[in-house]
Image (tube, rainbow, N blue to C red):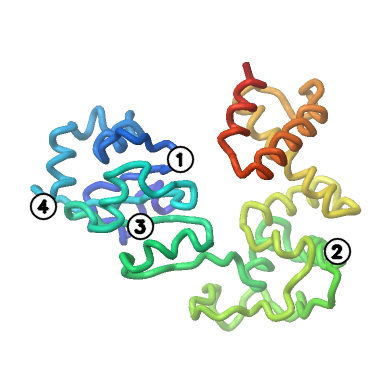
Amino acid sequence: MDWVEGNNPLLECYHYTFLIQLRHIKTSQSIGEAIIAQHKKLNVKRIKPLHLQAILEGETDERVLLLIDGYDEYKKGKNQDIDEIITNGVGNCYIIITSRPGSHLDGIRRFMSGEVKITGLSNKNIVRCSRYFLGKAESEEMLKQVLSYSEYYIDFNISDISDSDDSGGKSDDSGKSDDSGYEGHLVKLLKIPILLLMVCMIYKQNKSLPASKTQIIEKMIQLSISRTTLKTLGKKCEEIEDLEDLLHLLGQLAWEALQKYRMELLITQVRNLIT
């Protein structure tokens, strides 16, 4: 939100911030063309193609933060400009590359000046966030239900974490995990903030959680669909005809695409469904 609202002082040293989503990059595109294609509303009014090219070539003093998103979805050699930028940089740009974890990054690590891993919320932050969403009493009851799904004993004492601990409300930036023994079927999902929010919303609706992890995930999918359909169609999830059959079909298509390791196959099939 700080980035969106312009409240982050770390961004004050940059004149422009551009996001390039590699899933949308085309083979023949230059980096300037890719930026303009993915930022049409912004660049038509605020920056001309020739000026953008001068910035990218380092001919101006303007500093740029270039966010290259989804490197795990990119195949080396697809776009010459992207390969060149990752190897040698571009202009006065500071470059951040995002990717899911995996060996796919091994080939570019020697070009990187640093690496940051996002590991998810700690135990304490899960408690703080759930209390923010639900309140203390409901949060503790919800987390107790979550822990009951786990296969193994979990060293996680909800009552030991007060509303205001010694850290003064700050997150643990030491890089050390406080999640010893913190494993289980559903518990791992809570490390992801949006999924923690969804679990809290599910609990708030019924004052309890469904009987299985599968049912909870089904509720999460319904929440996502409801949010999307309300925005785009003005309908709630339960108002869509044959929704369950459609979800089963999408699940089958996704499984087939994963088996063939061809996600573009899934995209094509979904587009055909929409048509």
**Location of residue 220 by image quarter:** top right
Q: Secondary structure at mark 2?
A: loop
Residue picked out by circle 1: 23
The spot of residue 145 in percent (x, y) is: 85, 63
Mark 1–mark 4 Cα distance, whole angstroms, equals 30 Å
Residue picked out by circle 3: 96
Q: Residue at position x 81%, y 23% from top?
A: 242
Q: Which mark is residue 149?
A: 2
Which mark is in front, 2 or 1? 1
Residue most toward the top?
275
Which mark is in front, 4 or 3? 3
Could you tell me the amino acid type at mark 1?
A: Arg
Indicate whether 161 appears above or below 270.
below
Mark 2–mark 3 Cα distance, whole angstroms, equals 38 Å
Which mark is in front, 1 or 4? 1
Q: Residue at position x 65%, y 63% from top?
A: 191
**Location of residue 54 by image quarter:** top left
Residue contact between numbered discs 1 and 3, judged by CB atoms under 8 Å: no
Q: Secondary structure at mark 3?
A: strand
Q: Around disc 1, counting alpha carbons within 10 Å, would you say few (fewer than 14), some (14 to 19), or many (20 or more)?
A: few
